[in-house]
Each structure stands twice: as structure tokens, then as C-alpha cells.
Amino acid sequence: MNKLWPASLDRSPAGATPAVLPAEAEIRCGGHRLRLEPATLLAPMSGLTDTVFRRFIRQVAELAAAPDSAAAEPRLPFGGCGLIMTEFTSADGLIRSEKVARRYLSFAPDEHPIAAQLFGSDAVALSEAARVVEAMGFDAVDLNLGCPAKKVVKCNGGSGLLRDLPLLGRLFAALRAAVKIPLTVKFRAGWDERSLVHLELARMAEASGVNALALHARTRAQGYAGQAQWDWIGEVKQAVRIPVWGNGDVRCPEDAARLVAHTGCDGIMIGRAAASNPWIFQQIETWRRTGAYREPEQAERGRLMLAYFQQLAGAGMPGAVGKMKQFAAWFSHGVRDGARLRQAIYTARAEAEVIARVEEFFTQPITELVI
Ligand SMILES: Cc1cc2nc3c(=O)[nH]c(=O)nc-3n(C[C@H](O)[C@H](O)[C@H](O)COP(=O)(O)O)c2cc1C
């Protein structure tokens, strides 16, 4: 499934003003309030949003700054990203093996506020897994109702559940009864265009005590193709009183403002753009505060990429080289002469080799101007 954006994705300029961006958002759960400051969220992305990447997103400004830079930009709360989420984690796997918790749900104290995302279709397993998540200290637990992958759907997980609302109702009730921390749901609008369930699902979730909703405004059948249907996010926002976070195709601060203006959503969830432009959260918040934001320079891009790769290598992550190559596929499109950088990274075989090639690339003169 191609997860890169079509080149033609374009939005009208309407609504592209920072004045509409919310300064913060809140999830209420019983007497407890979880604040998102600002109202932006890092979307869960399997294989990418592990602890190294999540911390990296919150530290982008510091990591990209020149070591001797006196004019460091002002620090933003939470690096400009109000809530981060783990990649999706199998509820069945989590309750069967400690290794799963270590691999997918490890997080550092400075990652708060952080939510853990679970997938599964068994009420008992999901409830038990949610209790594990709560005991680990997560601030919220999220149920994945969007994953289109065949192996997940085959077991009725992810977007497979969009075809069985009665079962979903039972899962919401079981999860709500299992934990006290906020319960959120990230979903697609339906299995396909002929079976949209976003409104029914949203109302059912609210009635079951779900505390916030994130809609990736595509159907399962769409995969990542075409353009996200932001109208569906606006419809959900009209249908419920709990917070609604909009997700799909936000690639720059102007898109974030257009999404809010178009839908009235309470928060902006960003996935792929966090890898192609890790500055996006900082840019949105700086734009909201000051009315201006800037694009990073080539040297900053180099420092940031190197810092991320060094952290990945240092963390002893399984599959670190693969993660570096995956990141390079996104990130290099914003780098001048990025095709050459991609090529250099793709042919490297070990972590140290990737790092050496990145160092070499960013210290060499640019041969060709390609952005
Ligand atoms: C590589 C990749 C992995 C993803 N993994 C997950 C996941 O684990 N859980 C989930 O709910 N969505 C997952 N998604 C979907 C994203 O969270 C998001 O909904 C989607 O990319 C649309 O948002 P965007 O246009 O901002 O990227 C994934 C997307 C990508 C590209």
C-alpha cells in the first residue's frame, strides 16, 4: 500500500489563517482532565513512532540548533506537540508476552502526556491490555479502528471492526469499565463509501464513555489514496460533544488551519508530515503565536537527521537500519539533492555506515538542486 502522498494534493487557500488554531485542548474523564498544550497530536505510526521518534519530535528545535547558536528559538511547551501516541500494539500480544510491552510500549518520563494505542477484537483481552497500559503509567489508552492491514483485519481488528458495530459497542463498554484513564478511539469513516459509519460510531462511543475521537477521514477501501474527506470530520464534530481530532493530509501549518476552519475540530492529528517535516508541530505553534514561521535550513536538516539516527543507533532498537531507511524516504524530500541522499542511505548496510553517509552528504557541496 503506497503511503506517500499523491503529488497533486492541493487545498483551497480558504481558512489558512493562524487565528483559527486552538491554543489547547482538553480531555475530560470523570473528575480528571488531560490537557493538550497545544492542540496537536502525533498520529500513531507502526514501525516509526517508537520512543526514539516520539522524543525526537518533542526535541526537534534543540536537536537541529547549531551547537554554538546563541539565538536558539524559544522553547515551546511539549515541543509544540500536545499529545503523542505509541504505534499500535496487539492486545492479545501484550497480555501474553512481556516482550511486546518492552518493544512497543516503552516510554521515557519526558514523553508525558502520552497515549498507548491498542488493537484487538476480544473484550477480555482488550480490557486486560488496557489495565496493563494504565499500570504502566500512560495518560490515555486509544483503540485502533483504522488499520487497513489484511493480517489485522482478518482477525477483526483495526478497520475490520467498522463492519460490526454491535461488537464495537461491547468493546467500548468493556474498555470503559476496565480503566480510569481517558479512553480515546482513532477510526476511519467506514469500510467503504457505501458503508459509512462515522456518525453512528461516534455517537455510540460518546454514549459508552469514550472521552475523545480521532477520525482519519478516509475509508478502509481508500487506503491512503485520494484526498482525506474533511467533511466527515466536520460531521462528527457536529454529532458529539466530546473532543474530535481531525486527521488526514495535514502537511503544513496552513493545512492545519484549513482543517480547523473547515471542520471546527478540537485538535489536529498529524502522521506522515511528522516524518517528512518533523518541524511541523513547532511551525504550527509558532505560526499560531506569532503569525509567522520559517522553513529549516539545509544545515539544520542535516543536524536533525544525524541526531535522530544517532539516537536510534544508541537505543539498540531492533531493525534500526530499516527505520533509518524508512525515515530517509520521507525526510529526504525536503532536503536539497535529496535523491542522492536517499541513494546513499539505501545502499548502506549497517547503522554506522548510514550515519557516516549522512555526515558525508551534509558536509559536501550540493551538486543538483532538487527539493
Ligand atoms: C507508516 C504508517 C504507519 C501507520 N500506523 C498506524 C498505527 O499503528 N495506528 C493507527 O491508528 N494508524 C496508523 N497509521 C495511520 C496514521 O496514524 C494516520 O491516520 C494516516 O497516516 C493519515 O494521517 P496523515 O495524512 O497525517 O499521515 C499509519 C500510517 C503510516 C503512514
Image: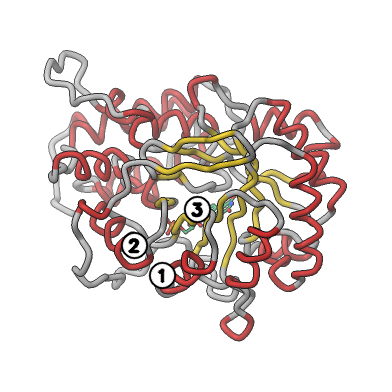
262 left or right of 155?
left
Q: Nearer the viewer, residue 187 or 267?
A: 267
**Which residue was labeled with disc 1?**
230
At a point 16% along the width and 43% down the height, the residue shown is 293
x and y, in percent, of residue 78 in the image: 38, 29
Q: How many C-alpha atoms fall within 10 Å of the one at disc 3: few (<14), some, or many (≥20)?
A: many
298 left or right of 106?
left
Badge 1 vs badge 2, beta-carbon distance below 8 Å: yes
Q: Earlier in the sequence, mark 3 or mark 1?
A: 1
Q: Quadrant of residue 289?
A: top left
As shown in the figure, which amino acid type bears the numbered disc 3?
Pro
In the image, residue 325 sits, relative to residue 64, either above or below, namely below
Q: Earlier in the sequence, mark 3 or mark 2?
A: 3
Give the CA separation, mark 3 to mark 2: 15 Å
Badge 3 vs badge 1, beta-carbon distance below 8 Å: no
x and y, in percent, of residue 21 in the image: 28, 51
Q: Quadrant of residue 37?
A: top left
At a point 47% along the width and 64% down the height, the residue shown is 237
Between tags 3 and 2, which lies in front? 3
